Image (spheres, rainbow, N blue to C red):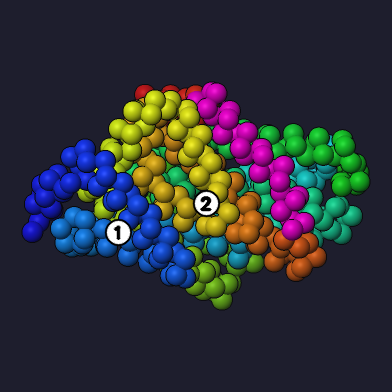
Amino acid sequence: MGPAAYAAQAKRLPGRDGDRGTQGLIGASLFGLLAATVLSGAVLGAALGLTGFALLHFAVGGATRLGVQTVWNTLNEFTLTAVPLFILLGEVLVASGLARGVYRALAPFFGRLPGGLLHTNIAVCTVFGAVSGSSMSVAAAVGSVAYPELKERGYDRPAVVGSLAGGGTLGLLIPPSLSLLIYGALTDTSIGRLFLAGVLPGLMMAAIFMALILWAAWRDPSIAPEAKRVALAEAMRGLPAVLPLILLIVAVLGSLFAGLATPTEAAGVGVAAAAILGFTLGDLTLRKLGEALIGTARIFAIIAMVFVGALVLAQAISMLGLPQQMLQVISEWGLSRWTLLLVIVVIYLVLGCFFDGLSMMIMTLPLVFPLMTGVGFDPVWLGVVVTLMIEIGMLTPPVGMNLFVLVGITRGEVDLASAARAATPYWFALLFGVFLLCLLPGIATWLPGLVFG
């Protein structure tokens, strides 16, 4: 039986003919199976895939082969190969130590402000976010340089970790972004539009984070001892250290937005440029490059496992017509689209306590995307909002990955509870960012509209 036959059979399923009892049974089966497989201790990707295959077999007339075909067709897409390349780009940046020179070059410009070098943490995370699509890579690269430096200067250690955890989330929003790349691949949304949509919200969040630091330093000046003022001419002499990162930004984003390269080709150019700069200007060695490759393989294996499972589950959900059924229920309940968005935000906040950001996004998009676009939300705007919700998850214990990365960098000097408390203002700032995007959607949609029309 081919896909067309399965689709025709699915249209005759009881769950698609308005039988509310059958629809409820299918919905309960979906969430029951998913809960059972997750709670069994199975890997998340396996839990999603097993749930999808079970639904395809029992509720869609034995259409398990269709799930396999969906995975094969999606993994054959050229765009998806950019994901491991962007991960590798971040790993090479961490291994090469290029963050050290950038941090010390930018520090004199921000040391004059209340909050001192805590602002530098946000600024350097913003710059690194423009060449690495991984939040954890940004937090690790900048944190490994900033934490020892600021600890030695007498900065409040939890405050340092909080600023690095918040700043690290910018790696998922400022292009190139792994979350926006995977979102585009899963939803068939333009990667170029998504990357452009992340620029202004990313800069907006960086500005909000710096405003938070100013406020915190005004309330408690002891968190950031007054830095030694450096003459502007002397500070300018350190700027050449930022040049490698600027070259990488031009190589990756310039080639992409100029239409000279696809996302995958731009990622390949970025990896090659990062390796050359790492060998010539950084301390990258063949051994460190090998470790970066191994680290990339491990990270991508985790993401790919969840991605494959989510594809199977998405196929089952699509065949059963669950998004359409939920839209019908919502219309009957009279819920506004903003109320629906509030429900989705709450769900993401809860899931952020249990799943890492990318896994959470891949797991929920098969249902959230058709549901939200079905009530009129712009798919590009939605991609930025979902990314902000993922960033919140990166700061939410007990699974907040940025917190774990930075607690490891401090070697236990800042425990997880202290790191979570210090990151709480940035957690609320990201939620405030979602509110601003709802109030002013043009923050995300204006730039893609200007470039692509």
Residue furthest out toward the front: 21
Of the numbered discs in the image, which one, if any, rests on residue 52? 1
Give the magenta-colored segment's residue range.
417-441
Q: Is residue 234 left or right of residue 49?
A: right
Q: Residues within 10 Å of mark 2 (few under 14, many from 20)?
A: some
Indicate the position of residue 78 as horizontal and vertical percent values: 30, 53
SS at badge 1: helix
**Which residue is at 88% across, 55% downward?**
153
SS at badge 2: helix
Can you tell which quarter of the image residue 409 is in?
bottom right
For the residue pair 21 and 261, the one nearer the viewer reads as 21
Is 423 included in the stretch rendered in magenta?
yes
Above or below, comparing residue 434 to residue 70 in the picture: above
Of the numbered discs in the image, which one, if any, rests on residue 351? 2
Looking at the rendered image, the quarter that the C terminus falls into is top left
Indicate the position of residue 18 as horizontal and vertical percent values: 21, 38
Can you tell which quarter of the image residue 114 is in?
top right
The amino acid type of the residue labelled 1 equals Gly
> What is the chief secondary structure element of the magenta stretch?
helix
Q: Is residue 153 left or right of residue 7?
A: right
Residue 206 in sight: no
For the residue pair 152 and 339, the one nearer the viewer reads as 339
